[in-house]
């Protein structure tokens, strides 16, 4: 209960579609970390993996409200903590079932304290989204087009800034 109050005071909202839609309808911005549980289990040392190809809900929200999409990438985020391997996939299955990430995260000195690494956030070019008629659903063809533009700008954003962070050899993989 205490943690919930603190994050609410900081401006957080529940991570559900209705709360996001209501917030956008009131002309407020939201930030969405779209990879979720699946992305936690994709952390790798040799490449950056984003689970995004089938994550189109934020595009639908943008189409219903006319909100722009701003691709954002945080360099160093995957280096702060390491997710220990789960070769049998038990923890990933349990996490998906219970909607909570069960995993062993290690950082500094093998503890769950994050490593001291520079975190650099970069923003891409806004993708303007045309608002659809109220009480209608976006057409899948249009969702696919906007989502494709978002993924293209996100990949370009990574390529533009990866050298500055020292990751010019680190591949970005979109799953």
Image (tube, rainbow, N blue to C red):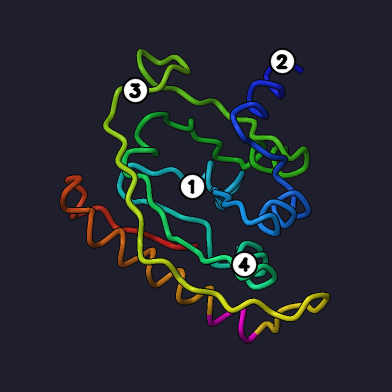
- Residue 121 in the magenta stretch? The answer is no
The residue that disc 3 covers is 115
Residue 109 higher or lower than 134, as above or below: above
Q: Earlier in the sequence, mark 1 or mark 2?
A: 2
The residue that disc 4 covers is 62
**Residue 35 appears left or right of 44:** right
Q: Earlier in the sequence, mark 3 or mark 1?
A: 1
Q: At x 35% / y 61%, what residue is drawn?
A: 124
Q: Earlier in the sequence, mark 1 or mark 4?
A: 1
The tag on residue 42 is: 1
Q: Nearer the viewer, mark 3 or mark 2?
A: 2
Q: Nearer the viewer, residue 125 or 148?
A: 125
Q: At x 69% / y 38%, what residue is drawn?
A: 95
Label 1 neighbour load within 10 Å: few <14, some 14-19, many 20+: some
Residue 42 higher or lower than 116, as above or below: below
Stretch of the chain drawn in magenta: 141-145
What whole-number distance in Å separates the C-alpha atoms at marks 3 and 1? 19 Å
Q: Position of residue 5 (x, y in %)?
A: 71, 22
Q: Position of residue 45 (x, y in %)?
A: 33, 42
Q: Element type at marker 1?
A: loop
What whole-number distance in Å separates the C-alpha atoms at marks 4 and 3? 35 Å
Name the outermost residue toward the front: 26
**Residue 39 appears left or right of 115:** right
């Amino acid at each position: 209960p205490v943690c919930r109050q603190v994050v609410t005071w900081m401006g957080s909202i529940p991570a559900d579609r209705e709360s996001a839609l209501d917030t956008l309808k009131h002309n407020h911005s939201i930030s969405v970390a779209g990879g979720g549980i699946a992305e936690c289990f994709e952390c790798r040392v040799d490449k950056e993996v984003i689970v995004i190809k089938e994550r189109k809900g934020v595009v639908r929200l943008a189409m219903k409200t006319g909100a722009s999409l701003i691709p954002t990438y945080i360099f160093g985020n995957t280096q702060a903590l390491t997710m220990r391997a789960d070769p049998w996939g038990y923890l990933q299955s349990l996490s998906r079932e219970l909607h909570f990430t069960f995993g062993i995260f290690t950082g500094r000195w093998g503890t769950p304290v994050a490593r001291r690494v520079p975190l650099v956030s970069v923003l891409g070019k806004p993708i303007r989204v045309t608002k659809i008629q109220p009480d209608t659903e976006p057409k899948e063809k249009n969702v696919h087009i906007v989502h494709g533009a978002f993924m293209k700008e996100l990949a370009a954003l990574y390529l533009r800034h990866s050298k500055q962070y020292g990751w010019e050899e680190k591949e970005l993989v979109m799953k």
